[in-house]
Amino acid sequence: MQDEKIAKITEMLLGGGKMLSVHCGACKGPLFELGGKVVCPVCGEKAEVAKAEVKPKTAPAEKVESVLLTKLNSLAEELAKETDHDKTLELLDRVKSILEVLEKLRER
């Protein structure tokens, strides 16, 4: 029985499926994304039920990126209004820091 499961999972991988970090609610096998659909190679049809239960959550990096972009927009608005040279340099330094972090997040 275990060999059959492994064979089905291997077949899914070789077919271009991407193994997800979530498991099927019915058989506890790993779920795969293939052709834009989430499927369970072990129990097949039951994966459609599990699909509704398993919505991909926003990755922490995506949440951080969203917050940083909001901060960057806020700083850009402040920068546009700022007339003091020292404050402008301070704002630019903050913008630079955010851009560096965003670049590192996007490299991953």
Image (cartoon, rainbow, N blue to C red):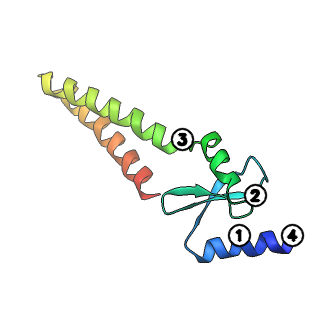
- Real-space Cα separation, disc 2 to disc 1, in angstroms: 9 Å
Furthest residue to the left?
83
Q: Looking at the image, which residue is at 46% across and 42% down?
A: 62
Tag 4 secondary structure: helix
Kind of residue sitting beneath label 3: Pro
Residue 39 in which image quadrant? bottom right
Sequence-wise, which precedes: disc 4 or disc 3?
A: 4
Above or below, comparing residue 63 to residue 15 in the picture: above
Sequence-wise, which precedes: disc 2 or disc 1?
A: 1
The answer to whether mark 2 and mark 1 are in CB contact below 8 A is: yes
Residue wearing tag 1:
9
Kind of residue sitting beneath label 2: Gly
- Real-space Cα separation, disc 4 to disc 3, in angstroms: 34 Å
- Real-space Cα separation, disc 1 to disc 4, in angstroms: 11 Å
Which circle marks residue 29 in the picture? 2
Residue wearing tag 3:
60
Furthest residue to the right?
1
Tag 1 secondary structure: helix
Sequence-wise, which precedes: disc 1 or disc 4?
A: 4
Residue 32 in which image quadrant? bottom right
Residue wearing tag 4:
2
Tag 3 secondary structure: helix
- Real-space Cα separation, disc 4 to disc 2, in angstroms: 11 Å
Q: Where is residue 65 in the image (x, y as percent from the top left)?
A: 41, 40
Q: Looking at the image, which residue is at 67% across and 53% down?
A: 47
Q: Viewer-proximal residue, 66 or 50?
A: 50
Q: Looking at the image, which residue is at 78% across and 53% down?
A: 28
